[in-house]
Image (cartoon, helix red, strand yellow):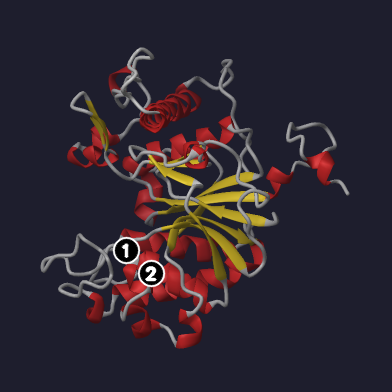
């Protein structure tokens, strides 16, 4: 049994690490807003020891590729832009299942045992492993998303039959797939995303999707892709091991030691500390494309990094342990985003051949 041998995860010549059996992927486009997120996630993967491989699934139009200057930022699989799959409805979330399907059907597809799918707005804190987050062929590990109420109400029956409904779960965000399972699931994930997004029965004023952001003016649920995932994966015959403490939302309070020591931080929501600190990645929406571009070379293009919150003072006895953890996680998250931006900029903008202290991963 070489398992004991494997428990020492330090890379050594000639010794395989179990954590290298994983290929991490996430979906992105060619906009500056996605570039700094991609840079931050990639750097966080390098910082936990570059387990396995990481590939950015990049979906852009030919015109965008023509003027794009961050292709070499990290290992990247290029796909067409899927956001206009329905010409009457620009929906950028089509890029996720579209790019995964494209990748699984390409010669760039992985030879590794497991595929970890992340979102771009995540920071890795330690390598994923099925030893701690159980998954197997036929069972995908994934994060719990309670707001996907359509899994449990009358919405599910609009799209899938009784046998498939038994396998549905309220999941999303991150997943660990066995290699063969993601090949099976990807086409159905895309197909069901189309079905949900285009079905007027689940548009405003229907309330059963759990999507709080639908309006008469924007009637289609933004989370159509999340339902496409859930219905598609179940239709592919797969079920889920649902986990609630692998991912922590920055700004939320951990509820136990496991969540405080999560594998990944997700920064999709506003984070704040009293009246003295708040930051939300969506603040960037208000900025011009030039201001959003954190990776442009030249002193005149140097952008401010994101604000990092202060920790509580050690003397303040009124603050409980998990509130301290909450603020530590916010600080860690934004510090790591800033580090990713700085090092990506350095790799891109330093003259080739000059010595760089940052570690970089070779492109696949």
- Separation (CA) of disc 1 from disc 2: 7 Å
On the image, which quarter does residue 4 sit in?
top right
Picture coordinates of residue 335, whole percent (x, y):
41, 25
Q: Nearer the viewer, residue 290 or 36?
A: 36
Query: Badge 2 local density, few (<14 within 10 Å), some, or many (20+)?
Result: many
Q: Few, some or many C-alpha atoms within 10 Å of disc 1 (few <14, some 14-19, many ≥20)?
A: many
Q: Which residue is at a point 73% across and 45% down the rendered structure image?
A: 18
Q: Is residue 81 visible?
A: no
Quarter of the image where one finds residue 138: bottom right
Element under label 2?
helix
The residue identified by callout 1 is: 223
Q: Where is 211 relative to 11, above or below?
A: below
Identify the residue shown where x is 68% and y is 44%: 19
Q: Residue furthest right?
A: 1
Identify which residue is drawn at 86% across, 46% down.
Answer: 2
Q: Is residue 197 above or below residue 351?
A: below
* Residue 40, disc: none
62 vs 51: above or below: below
Where, quadrant-wise, is the C terminus in this rendering? top right
Residue 139 position by quadrant:
bottom right
Q: Which residue is the site of mark 2?
A: 227
Does residue 212 show up? yes
Q: Is residue 352 left or right of residue 227?
A: right
Q: Is residue 231 left or right of residue 141?
A: left
Residue at horizontal 45 percent and vertical 64 percent from the top: 97
Secondary element at image label 1 = loop
Residue at the far front in the pictured view: 317
Q: Nearer the viewer, residue 316 or 53?
A: 316
- 169 left or right of 359 in image: left
**Which residue appears farthest toward the top when viewing the image?**
315
Q: Is residue 126 above or below residue 145?
A: above
């Amino acid at each position: 049994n070489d398992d004991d041998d494997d428990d020492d995860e330090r890379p050594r010549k000639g010794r395989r690490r179990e954590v290298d059996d994983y290929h991490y992927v996430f979906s992105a486009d060619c906009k500056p807003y996605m570039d700094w997120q991609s840079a931050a996630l990639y750097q966080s993967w390098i910082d936990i020891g570059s387990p396995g491989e990481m590939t950015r699934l990049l979906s852009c139009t030919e015109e965008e590729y023509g003027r794009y200057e961050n292709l070499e930022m990290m290992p990247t699989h290029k796909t067409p832009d899927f956001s206009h799959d329905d010409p009457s409805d620009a929906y950028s979330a089509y890029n996720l299942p579209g790019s995964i399907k494209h990748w699984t059907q390409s010669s760039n597809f992985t030879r590794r045992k497991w595929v970890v799918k992340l979102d771009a707005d995540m920071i890795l804190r330690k390598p994923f492993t099925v030893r701690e987050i159980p998954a197997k062929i036929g069972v995908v590990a994934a994060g719990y998303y309670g707001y996907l109420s359509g899994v449990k109400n009358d919405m599910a029956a609009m799209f899938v039959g009784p046998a498939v409904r038994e396998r549905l779960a309220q999941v999303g965000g991150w997943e660990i797939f066995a290699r063969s399972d993601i090949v099976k699931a990807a086409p159905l994930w895309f197909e069901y995303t189309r079905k949900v997004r285009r079905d007027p029965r689940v548009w405003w004023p229907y309330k059963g999707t759990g999507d709080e952001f639908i309006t008469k003016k924007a009637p289609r649920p933004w989370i159509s892709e999340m339902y496409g995932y859930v219905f598609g994966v179940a239709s592919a015959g797969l079920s889920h091991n649902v986990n609630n403490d692998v991912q922590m939302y920055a700004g939320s309070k951990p509820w136990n030691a496991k969540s405080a020591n999560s594998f990944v931080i997700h920064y999709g929501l506003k984070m704040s500390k009293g009246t003295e600190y708040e930051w939300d990645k969506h603040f960037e929406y208000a900025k011009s494309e030039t201001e959003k571009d954190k990776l442009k070379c030249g002193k005149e293009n140097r952008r401010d990094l994101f604000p990092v919150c202060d920790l509580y003072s050690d003397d303040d006895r009124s603050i409980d342990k998990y509130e301290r953890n909450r603020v530590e996680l916010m600080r860690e998250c934004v510090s790591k985003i800033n580090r990713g931006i700085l090092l990506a900029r350095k790799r891109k903008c330093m003259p080739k051949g000059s010595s760089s202290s940052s570690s970089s991963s070779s492109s696949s």
